[in-house]
Image (cartoon, rainbow, N blue to C red):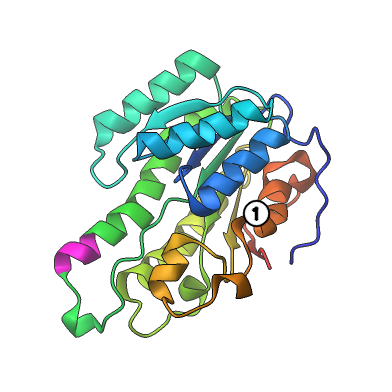
Amino acid sequence: MFDYQAPSDLLKDKIILVSGAGSGIGKAAALAYAHKGATVILLGRTVEKLEQVYDEIEKAGAPQAAITPFDLAGANDDNYQELVNSIHANFGRLDGLLNNASILGTLTPIQSYSLNTWNQVIQTNLNAQFALSKYCLPLLQEAENASIIFTSSGAGRKPYAYWGAYSVSKAATEALAQVLFLELENTSKIRVNTINPGSTATKMRSQAFPGENPEKVAKAEDIMPAYLYLMGNGSLQENGKQFDAQ
């Protein structure tokens, strides 16, 4: 497991946007960031799930979060611009962006892969991450320093047979992160890194490995040290790198 003990005020006064914040790794990250002092913007498709995370943050006495319902699979330029305008009006900047939302698609040979499913996975896992990063860059540039984190996958660093669009989308995510890093390296205070969460007990994991005992793999909360480290000021020197959460 990634070895890092985050101080209690690690993210004090920081504004952080988390995609896929309603469940799984996104939910765990949103809660972890809030517990360390951040104001978290909860972005996701299902309002009820976002409200549950919001309530948990409130109950913990952490800074009040913001709920932002958003359909990454169907959003267009205007939707992203409206999102950014709203964040700017309410907060003025972003200190962090966690590009985390993903869907699995189907596990099947390329020859049998549905074009519609392929497009949905690429749209959610890759195109939406590109768009969020692109439109949020001006907000991130307003911060004293800022961090963009992409949740990657072992299936992206070493593609798996039958994992089709998911594996391709995560390999492309690694490339997207590198392009961003290279473009921003000498011109801004924004750092860009990826995290491979490893085997983690999430709904997506249970879809991919239905026979697996979830007690035998890490919980989402267990892998948060890597996510906290890369979002805090202790990682200002980390840029353009691949990290393993466990």
Q: Is residue 208 left or right of residue 30?
A: left
Q: Which residue is mark 1?
A: 221
Q: Residue at x 41, y 76 (%)?
A: 210
Q: State the extent of the magenta-drawn residues as a range.
A: 115-119
Q: Residue at x 51, y 55 (%)?
A: 177
The three-letter code of the residue at mark 1 reads Glu
Name the spot of residue 128 as percent of width and height, x first. Answer: 35, 47
Q: Residue at x 73, y 49 (%)?
A: 229
The reply to whether residue 148 is in sight is: no
Q: Is residue 188 left or right of residue 226?
A: left
Q: Residue at x 35, y 39 (%)?
A: 46
Q: Which quadrant does the C terminus fall into?
A: bottom right
Name the spot of residue 9 as percent of width and height, x first. Answer: 80, 32
186 is within the stretch colored magenta: no
Above or below: residue 68 compared with residue 157: above
Q: Residues within 10 Å of mark 1 (few under 14, many from 20)?
A: some
Above or below: residue 164 compared with residue 52: below
Q: Nearer the viewer, residue 165 or 32?
A: 32
Outermost residue toward the top in this view: 89
Name the spot of residue 190 as percent of width and height, x first. Answer: 61, 40
The reply to whether residue 109 is in sight is: yes
Q: Which quadrant does the N terminus fall into?
A: bottom right
